[in-house]
Amino acid sequence: MDFLNQTRFIERLQFFNGQRLFDSDLQGLEAFNREMRWLHNKSLHQPGIGNGFAVTGKKGEREVRIDPGYAIDIEGREIVLTQTQLEPIPPVASEVDGTPVLFDLTVSYPPDDYLEETETREGVCVSQGVVRRKEEPIFCWVRLDRNGQPLDPQIKAEILTGLRIVLARAEVLECSLNKDISIAERLSARPASQPYICCGHLEVVDWKAEQLVAFDLPKVLGSSGFKRLQEQFREAATAFPFILPFSLKAEIDTRECGFLTTPCYTAHVTGPRVFRLSADIGDGVKEEVPIFAEGLLQIIESEPDHFIADAQPIIQVLTPFSAPLSQTEALLKQLTERMIKEWRLEWMGVEG
């Protein structure tokens, strides 16, 4: 693993009474703790802003205000600003065609040779030595092209890899802000809480058949008009799908997901699509009637803790059958019972 290979200090320093300490011992102790902390940051966080680093600037102003903040770069190094800082706007007039110039304000971790000496002391063997250096982040205005991409390819690579963290974007015209500073380009070091995805699989669904339209099957089958169409219907039943005059509904409990707002639910019916039903053709003889059934599912009455799954069955008889059409009611009853018993549900909710 590359990030482990880059970790240089994996030895824990030990001390004993009377030991003679060198500067390398104490610096090694500090380096060990620092490397372990950076390894933690690199492993569990992404490059970006952890807290603060608010940037404000109004149209017409010639400087922006940067508030204290904490950020992490791709190496896990902490970029810390402890006091408010004012950063001047780049002194440019405009692009060649007179349009505003785009800049990104970035912050990065300071290299060792950039650190300011804040305290020196007299030594025993040398005249003087530095004992404290001030870690201050490096702020830089990065010029962009019309598409919002850095002109300098090296800087662009540093931004993409996370060595530089973008804090804000500015439009500069006549050495001042052409509009209020934008912070939409910022990246958070904290893992995003949304979109939050949760899904479920129900082996047992409490389907309830709900009639959609008034439909008296025995009355329809006994009507003179239907009797004239019996033969045509027998042929059409194997050629065209039919929408059943009822739907299967079930309330799905999603409380275990802990959605805070109503998510976007999707669901589909799983289980058999071909049902082989038994029809009585007379004299105690049974005929197998294979029927294909599909449930067109829609989600209704969505809430954070539940939704209603509404499946509309569409069926088609797969082979010609000789059973009398009076068996249709019994076949539909068998089919409905099988669908309610054997159809399951898989669902997913996406919040955010």
Image (spheres, rainbow, N blue to C red):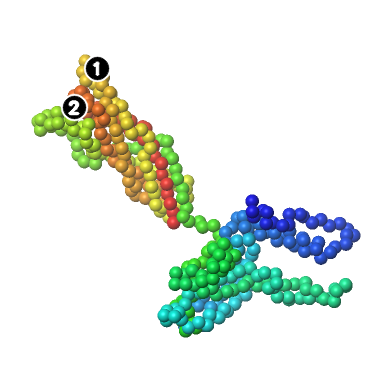
In the image, what residue type sits under mark 1? Val
Q: Residue at (44%, 43%) from the top-left corner?
A: 200
Nearer to us in this view, 339 or 307: 339
Nearer to us in this view, 209 or 38: 38
Q: Which residue corresponds to mark 2?
A: 325
Query: Residue 9 got which mark?
Result: none
Q: Report whether 57 appears left or right of 18.
A: left
Looking at the image, can residue 223 be seen?
no
**Mark 1 residue crowding within 10 angstroms, few (<14) / some (14–19) / many (20+):** few
Q: Residue furthest top?
A: 283
Q: Residue at (43%, 40%) from the top-left corner?
A: 201
Above or below, comparing residue 56 to residue 203 in the picture = below
Q: Position of residue 24 (x, y in %)?
A: 80, 63
In the image, what residue type sits under mark 2? Leu
Q: Report whether 34 appears left or right of 303.
A: right
Tell me which label, 1 or 2, sits earlier in the chain. Answer: 1
Q: Residue at (40%, 53%) from the top-left corner?
A: 262
Task: Using the rendered view, name the quadrant where residue 269 is placed.
Answer: top left
Above or below, comparing residue 252 to residue 262 in the picture = above
Task: Using the rendered view, name the quadrant where residue 281 is placed.
Answer: top left
Above or below, comparing residue 115 to residue 308 in the picture = below
Q: Which residue corresponds to mark 1?
A: 285
Above or below, comparing residue 318 to residue 40 in the picture = above
Q: Report whether 326 appears left or right of 137.
A: left
Q: Position of residue 71 (x, y in %)?
A: 59, 65
Q: Position of residue 162 (x, y in %)?
A: 57, 63
Q: Residue at (70%, 75%) from the top-left corner?
A: 116
